[in-house]
Image (cartoon, rainbow, N blue to C red):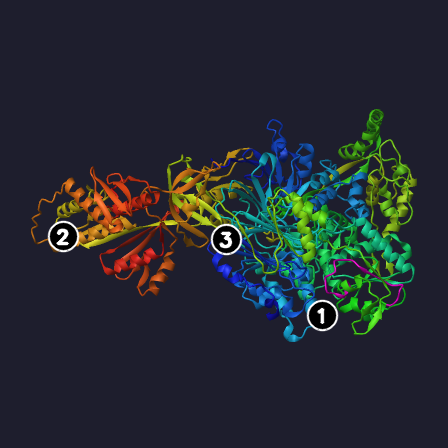
Amino acid sequence: MGTSVQVKPLCGVYNENPLSYLVSIDGFNFLVDCGWNDQFDTSLLEPLSRKGFRVASSVDAVLLSHPDTLHLGALPYAMKQFGISAPVFATEPVYRLGLLTMYDHYLSRKVKFDLGNLLSLSAFDLDVDSVFSHCMQVSEFDLFTLDDIDSAFQNIIRLTYSQNYYVSGKGEGIVIAPLAAGHLLGGTFWKITKDGEDVIYAVDFNHRKEKLLLNGTVLESFVRPAVLITDAYNALLSNQPPRRQKDQQLLDAILKTLRADGNILVPVDTAGRVLELLLILEQYWEHHHLTYPIFFLTYVSSSTVDYAKSFLEWMSDKIAKSFEDSRDNAFLLKHVTLLISKSELEKVPDGPKIVLASMASLEVGFSHDIFVDWAADSKNLVLFTERGQFGTLARVLQSDPPPKAVKVTMSKRIPLVGEELAAYEEEQNRKRKEEALKATLIKEEESRATLGAEQAVGDPMIIDAKIKQPSSNGAALQHGAFKDVFIDGFVSPPSSAGPMFPFYENTFEWDDFGEVINPDDYTRNDEDMDQASMQVGEFNGKLDEASASLFLDATPSKVVSSEQTVYVKCSLVYMDFEGRSDGGSIKKILSHVSPLKLVLVHGSAEATEHLKEHCLKNVCPYVFAPQIEESIDVTSDLCAYKVQLSEKLMSNVLFKKLGDFEVAWVDAEVGKAENGTLSLLPLSTHPPPHKTVLVGDIKMADFKQFLASQGIQVEFAGGALRCGEHVTLRKVGDSSQKGGGNIQHIILEGPLSEEYYKIRDHLYSQFYAL
Amino acid sequence: MASASAAAPASSLKRANSKTSSEGDELIITPLGAGNEVGRSCVYMSFKGKVVMFDCGIHPAFSGMAALPYFDEIDPSAIDLLLVTHFHLDHAASLPYFLEKTTFKGRVFMTHATKAIYKLLLSDYVKVSKVSVEDMLYDEQDILRSMDKIEVIDFHQTLEVNGIRFWCYTAGHVLGAAMFMVDIAGVRILYTGDYSREEDRHLRAAELPQFSPDVCIIESTYGVQNHQPRHIREKHFTEVIHSTISRGGRVLIPAFALGRAQELLLILDEYWENHRDLHNVPIYYASPLAKRCMAVYQTYINSMNDRIRNQFASSNPFDFKHISPLKSLDEFRDVGPAVVMASPGGLQSGLSRQLFDKWCSDKRNACVLPGYVVEGTPAKAIMSEPKEVTLASGLSAPLNMTVHYISFSAHADYNQTSTFLKELMPPNIILVHGEANEMGRLKQKLLSVFADGNTKIITPKNCQSVEMHFNSQKMAKTIGKLAEKTPAVGEILSGLLVKKGFTYQIMAPDDLHVFSQLSTGSVIQRITIPYSGAFAVLKHRLNLIYESVEASTDEESGVPTLKVHDKVTVKQETENHVSLHWTADPISDMVSDSVVALVLNASRELPKLMVESEQETNEDEQSKKADKIIHALLVSLFGDVKYENEGKLLINVDGTTALLEKQSGEVECENEGLKERVKTAYRRVISAIKPIPPPGS
């Protein structure tokens, strides 16, 4: 029997929720994708966490397909909370850009930094300082920490496209290979092979070659896989206009606003489609000598672009070629300024500008803030380049007609006062006592544990104001403040090294006048020092500064969210730059690939049903669209066994060549080879007769041409081909059940005549009779 | 090419080629260069009609045509695939020539980094090589054109060309260096190119392939020598430089512009960073390529080791702080101590030679040779520290500067080679890329390592072919309806054998479209014939000829039909017409033809009243007639055939007799050969007499 294949969706079927599916092949469980939405809604992960089913613990390997939240967002949380310890597979860009995406998410919503986290942060050369001073989205975000992200990602096994990875151990015999999906940089569709049967998981692919970034998917080169798992996300999307036209529309819209002195906000993802957008803008600016500033604002923008520079292997031929020819890396962006804090943006002089800011959902991040600031001005434009995730602010704004006003949540961190403070302190004291007790029991371990987990999961930080800034002089402050690792109940002297052996590279920017000085560094330092000497709670700074320094301080604080109504006066435009195949192309690709069994996931109920119906009719008779947690069996009913072809038999076989294939009819006797396998030997008796098989595919139009070239009068008449005087040729295909029975019947009719036999001979010449 | 071919042995591969094209199981490997020498790497391989070539280099010690590998030994148009391991001239520099000036029409692959540097390096090579115009192998334009033909492959990526599967592993030698594994019909060949199993500052060590190859073509540059540990070499290197500078001398490091140079720069930059007293001593990287190379190194970070990749997270390690590039000597002010790394490494010409000539007579100065020095270059000459050297101008000068040879070349040494081979355990080892003596010593030593005798070690000379026989077992997979149950021994299996590349599948015809892109079809034929006679007459006549004629009525129109031989349906369409329906296949076509003939005949003869004689031939007569025919045919085949009793035939051929049982076809004979022949003959005779098998069978 064939390989047993089961598919069980954990999230993202009949809707546009994040993607996460369990595919088990002969008992080896792959978790393909582990996505989350931008709101980080834990209820979505329920199927994965459900105890009774032991889903998480049964996972043997995790495959990631794209570096965005919808495909890998839940990985850090799931690995920590549900104890998934299986190896994770991804391509290098998915690993890198995915990591950056998660960092960006974390930083966008987390203000409560522990020092330990900052250490790992600084390794990524982020300007931590600015992160601190301008976090606007303040929430009690405690689903995962930077450490969790790091530990989830550090063990990812990185593969290159079409690298065959041979699974060992439990999954012996399974080979997995990532292949280009064409949607995001490094984006993958996975091919899982066992015993020559392919299971392909291909979601969010793009068959078109991008203008700049990527080559299209290679999905089309795979035909007849045993199982294809794909999405119906775009099934209802009508054909897209040609790319050139789309680009032009985008640029027209942008220029119109800029010329009218308006600002443009493009909510983007952290490291996905934004790369393509950057290249499009960069190129356009270059060609037209535009001077409007472009800003790319995420917490990790500079790292993103740095990494993009080193991923040339994964980009389109065009980019590789231009690098070979001119040594110009496409991501040496001349017109785009990379920003990692909003204050930098605020320093920019007023005037029309275009800002690409994360997140695309407008739920959190810089885009959220900027939207709130800019929405009220009718000159401004918010340009969406992808459909917002379901239920997010971006989706609301994309509805038709767009809402006049939206409610947004603004969060701020304020210090605790009065009863709350007392309660908090009591709680802290109790905790401290407990910890002290623990510390006496296990000294060493405790210190480590507190550093990582306790604070991470726990409550607002507790840092003594005294040790807050041990070295508060000069430029060293910039990083120095975070060098010291705080361990509860233990104050390390300023000179001692931190237990994590932090390493800092102080890189200075130079201009013609020497080191670039940021005046803010100095002003703020003074304030910090002031605050250090001040008593907790006595803030005299502006509210922003105060809230920023709150988390620097150990002040017990809480997050207060306020709802605010934003009147949307600016124009809203949605243009599809998602880089996914449209409905028509998906159908075309599916019928070309024509899998033996098809599983549809991810896509609105309507789209899923539509595609299912279409495929049942045109692609294959086995189309499944499972519900959430519904385990379906797509084991192929294919039987197979191996035989050895003996030399004796093969010497008598005459192959006929048909394209890539060579075909022959064999009659053989089954024997046993020395090593016990079955072998085929030539027959000793007269071969049994068999029905003649005509192999070949005849296209009526081609055949018409052929006959015409042979001097026979031909014309199409009423669906049949009329050859000569009386002979007609008709094709009776089983088009109603494609894939099920692709045998074509050709009916040749005519009166007894010489012509009839002549045409018959020509017809026969189109086939190979076996 | 005349000079090159003069040295070539007589055996020409062109002839061998035509022989092997018939799916031979002989694997032929021929070095066209780098056989018992270092330089012009080029190895030709053919197996099962597929031809692969590895590397395409030039010999650095020769110029013009003489530097090429022996391309005239092969037919370039027969090559399916050309794989280039890394960008060094002795591995890649004849590629533009081969792609543009020969009949080669296969595909070429190299890694991304190799391709990027290849162009840089060759453009430079074309510019600096001082050969007359007619001796030029190719020009800048050829290089640009070749760039369009070169395809890229990433490490571990598995590709397939013409049924040849191949992928590559990190080789560690220089940035982008690869070892290629080629799989043809299940036989794996590993070509290491230049490799190093030692991780250094920026490169990963060569990987150990997860599959053991059947043949391993491996470099043997360092033969049985062993390298000193890396940190000792590095220490030695920095000490020599530091002490030279301390005594006010200048240090010349002649190095190949790319590859090892970057490693040395990393060492120097780090050393300078740690020694403040050196900060005022300049380091120059003097190469016209210097700046452009750095862009490549700054980009392909992902081909390097984890150390570099982790550093990259904070800053690009190839942004050197203490090293400045130097385009030409005009920019260089020779005042006081300095360190200059200059290309080429062999001191043949160019910047390194100019500096050497300038500095060689001052005894404070030092020259550090950091890599493998090719035989026949000036660098090799100064290694023996002669008293005098000949300058580029032709004058001679005393050699007073100290010469140090500290090898940083990333070639495997004996320890690495032997461990690598021991872990891989390939049954066949072919040594290339090594001086004849070194190679011989390595062979002897390896033979003692693999003393069990199962390993063959071969050191072919250029153009000397190595032939190996691989008994490939063809395995087929029976799938679909045919495989619903696994047959027992002795059962008969019939189906379509479909071959794609080197994989075979057996399937039922109905499944063909399911498992391949091929489709099957059928042709249904309907022919109408004028016939105005009675339908019963037709029936009667058909009955006389065919064993099986079934009469029924058509369900739709209710007209009478006859089914002849279960294949052809004769239908009375109207009073004046009958129609024949059948699905085309050779037998049905034949039956239909005869029916057509019969119908035509019947309508022609209709007026006559046929008086059919009682032709109900009885069984006996028929079989007697058949017997006669069989006998006659066998006589014509074997000569002496006699009737024996019980329906047996005695066949006598050259004194050997065979007894044939006519009914069953059983043959009794002592001679197996004759038995087979008689059996076959009988089978054919029977099928000639009764060509149409009875219906239903």
Q: Is residue A471 above or below residue B7?
A: above
CA distance separating discs 2 and 1? 92 Å
Read off the chain for label 1. Answer: B
Specify which label sits upstream in the sequence, 3 or 2: 3
Give the residue pinned by disc 2: B602
Q: Which mark is residue B138?
A: none
> Which of B588/B414 is in front?
B414
CA distance separating discs 3 and 2? 59 Å
Quick one: label 2, few (<14), some, or many (20+) residues within 10 Å?
some
Whether residue B240 sits left or right of residue B433 in the image: it is right
Q: Is A399 a magenta residue?
A: no
Do tag 3 and tag 1 residues touch (Cβ < 8 Å)?
A: no
Q: Is residue A588 above or below residue B132?
A: above
Secondary element at tag 3: loop
Specify which label sits upstream in the sequence, 2 or 1: 1
Magenta region: which residues? B361-379
Q: What residue type is disc 2 on?
A: Ala
